Image: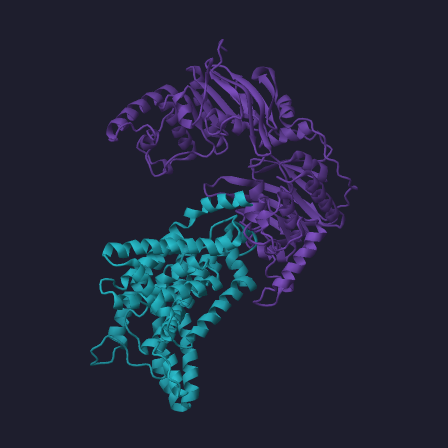
Amino acid sequence: MSARSDLPRWVDIGLIPALNLIIAFVMAGLVVLVIGENPFRALSILLGEPLFSLQGWCNILYYATNFIFTGLCVAVAFHAGLFNIGGEGQAYIAGLGAATPGLFIGAALAAVLPNALSQPITLLICLVCSFLVGGLWGLFPGYLQAKRGSHIVITTIMLNFIAASLMQYMINRVYRPLGMQAVESRAVNDAYIWNLREIGRAFGAKLPSTPLTPVIFIALLAAFAVWYLLWRSKLGYEIRAVGANQDAAVYAGINPARIIMITMMISGGLAGLLAFHEVLGTQHRLVLEYVQGAGFVGIAVALMGRSHPVGIVLAALLFGLLSEGGTQLSFEIQTISKDLVVVIQGLVVLFMGALEQAFHPWLERYFRREG
Amino acid sequence: MSTAIPAIELIGIDKRFGAVHANINVSLAIAQGSIHGIIGENGAGKSTLMSILFGFYHADKGEIKLRGQPVKIRSSTDAISHGIGMVHQHFMLVEPFTVLENIILGAEGGSLIGPALDKARAALKRLADEYELDVDPNAIVGELPVGLQQRVEILKALYKGAEVLILDEPTGVLTPAEADHLFRILQQLRDQGKTVILITHKLREIMAITDRVSVMRRGELVADFETKKTNVGELAEAMVGRRVLLRVDKKPAKPGEVVLDVRGLTWRDKKNIARVDDASFTVRKGEIVGIAGVSGNGQSELLDVITGITRATSGQVLFKGEDVGAIDSAAELRKRGMAHVPEDRHHRGLITTFSAAESAILGYQRNPALGNGFRLNYEAVVNQTRKQMEEFDVRPVDPLLKSGKFSGGNQQKIILAREIGSNPDLLIVGQPTRGVDIGAIEFIHRRLIELRDQGKAILLVSVELDEIRSLSDRILVMFSGRIMGERPPSTDERDLGLLMAGVAQEAA
């Protein structure tokens, strides 16, 4: 999906994203100005607060964990020529995979095994199930695209709504214990991921209060795994071949329908890992709407990261910074809500995606003259 | 029949596309009220010339006169306002619209559609009576058979006031009965004083309905005949020309056992037209069998069916004695020893955004030598590619350079190295030297002969007659999906030209 380009590589992966980002910021600054606030003050809070405290950095990494998963989800599909905008729904529905083993198998394991053993085993099962359930939710539109020709953009976005309704029903009617007021499941104590503060406490160290958990390492591992899959495996080669040129793929004996389904399974599974992180590491129970738009941020992250795992990790950090900064901003300036960050994100998507080509001809002309 | 002032005069038209000289100083006069044929092989420059007349391209040099008046045609709108209409090979119709809606397309006139439709309905009725051009104005175009769709195209041109009608390969998609009806329509148009230009490569059509015929070859207008005073043989010779045979040193073939045995192979497209029609032939070890023909006569489809990209409608493909006609996986056939250099290297042969090394394993990515199981051993891929690049003299020897950055000849060498490197029993080669420089052509030809001398079977498809004649040990000619006949490479060009034009003859 990335543009064909004759530009030097550093321009393509460095200068253009930077330019787009700057313009997105300038536009967002104008929005702040319209609200009647000082854009420079807003900027200094947005960037300054998170970057100059340990807690800020921890929170950036917490957000980045989610964005890496959803960014990888979008990127893997991109490489097969598919625009999966259903990461939101895939991550949401995968909550069933994350919570269910924790709620039911976990207790059984805890009964027969010591806690130090039952917890990791349960967590591993939860991890696999999160991936599988998210993957199945991705496989479904993948199947519809491959076999019925239904466009994946349409089906994935529709399935986001279905996932939302289904989860509402499941949590309310199936997972909510009788008599409980809040619409949520009971706590998943048998698969509990400690956050940094809790880990620190166990070792007698006082660390800042943050939802950051070691799942960030799983996210980095996933980024490496995606790189390995795409560029060092036979399956990844076939995925990229289908994405780059389906005629050539058929010539090479690759079955595009099969590849599309496998890719969507992997893509949905990666989004599903967000559920593992959020449900077991942050909420410790199945709650409503815990994805909070991270699935859509993943689109921006993948676009900005040029669908490359390294780029995605960097872009996820940037969007983590924006999310954390946005929270701070809404604290400090009453007239600005957290939604402004969504505006900035939206502008980035606009400039990275829709207007990606805007600077291209201009830059190409410039560099041709230079070269 | 010919009046003093020609309807159209093209004077010294010259057009280049980059390195390709598509039209070389072409001058042509077309008489008012005549049917004028333009024939030539693919790439002879017929379509370019007509596109210049219709305003799609601009000539680099030259002048166009209509009824004696010099005109500048900058766009198709200009052409239409000068009374020139064109019926393209691929119809320009909006399929979900009705016939009437298609007719007024581009001539709606005003913001309300009603008056235009009424006017068109009346005009349509008049045209139908005048020229035997009956079409239901309320029919949905997409639901009409191709012959009628073409009629809509003609009506569209006439409705916009065309005095000159250009038809580009109009019978390619028609059944013989539909073609006959089309010819009757064209004759009536001529009798009413319209001028018709017919672009085709089918000699029979030219003989059947044209008044004059011009022959194009390699961008030049090489001959101009009054149809009554010429014959099919003379036209075929003019079309193909006498060219210097590319010299390829080769020993006589020593054909061995049959490797590929195609029996009654038929493939029908979605519209149920047989694009490959009951084709039967064999290819033996140690020989090159060439399939000649003007492109678009079923060669591509034949290759697709044999190589497992599409499945045959009926008939058998025996490869090393086993029927593989039902296999529609190119991977399976590759495993059995069938290698394929595809006709279209940009869209099939390699992936331009992939590195050379990645393109060099296309189709062989599952080969155990390139990593076991899940893993693709990148180092092994790069090393293998570097070796192949050196052996096949690909320049530059840079396996990490993007495939699209190589020249055409070097791209083709990468593909050839890949396919020959797989040590196949049968190599199927489509257009091996299309868009390839002379040096690379010689190299590629030499490698193919070498492969033959190693006792491999080769099936070669090319629209370059020179190439077919210099490489093949036996030549088959394909026309309209059928194998028209077999000839030895020593046969004369005229004979081949006739077969390529669909004129069956007894073997000379």
The residue under the point 22% across, 76% down is A182
Taking depth in this image into account, of B484 and A100 the one nearest to the observer is A100
Picture layout, residue B183 above or below residue A31: above
Colour treatment of the image: by chain
Q: Is residue B223 above or below residue A280?
A: above
Identify which residue is drawn at 40% across, 21% down: B162
**Colour displayed for chain A in the image of the structure:** cyan
- Residue at left offset 52%, top offset 40%: B274
Residue B446 appears at what percent x and percent y?
73, 44
Q: Position of residue A259 (x, y in %)?
A: 48, 59
Q: Who is closer to the viewer here, A90 or A289? A: A289
Point out residue B255 in the picture as x, y percentages from the top left corner.
Answer: 75, 46
The residue sitting at 37% across, 67% down in the picture is: A320
Say how many tags the image has: 0
Q: Is residue A170 left or right of residue A256?
A: left
Q: Quadrant of residue A237?
A: bottom right
Q: Is residue B114 left or right of residue A190?
A: left
Is residue B373 visible in the rendered structure shown here?
yes
Q: In the rendered image of this protein, which colour is used for chain B?
A: purple
Screen quadrant of the C terminus of chain A: top right
Residue A192 seen from this side: no
Q: Position of residue A284 (x, y in %)?
A: 32, 79
A106 relative to B350, above or below: below
Q: Nearer the viewer, residue B357 or B324?
A: B357
Instruction: Answer above or below: position of B320 versus B493.
Output: below
Instruction: Check the image and name the residue furthest to the top.
Output: B4
In the image shown, does B406 or B434 lie closer to the viewer?
B406
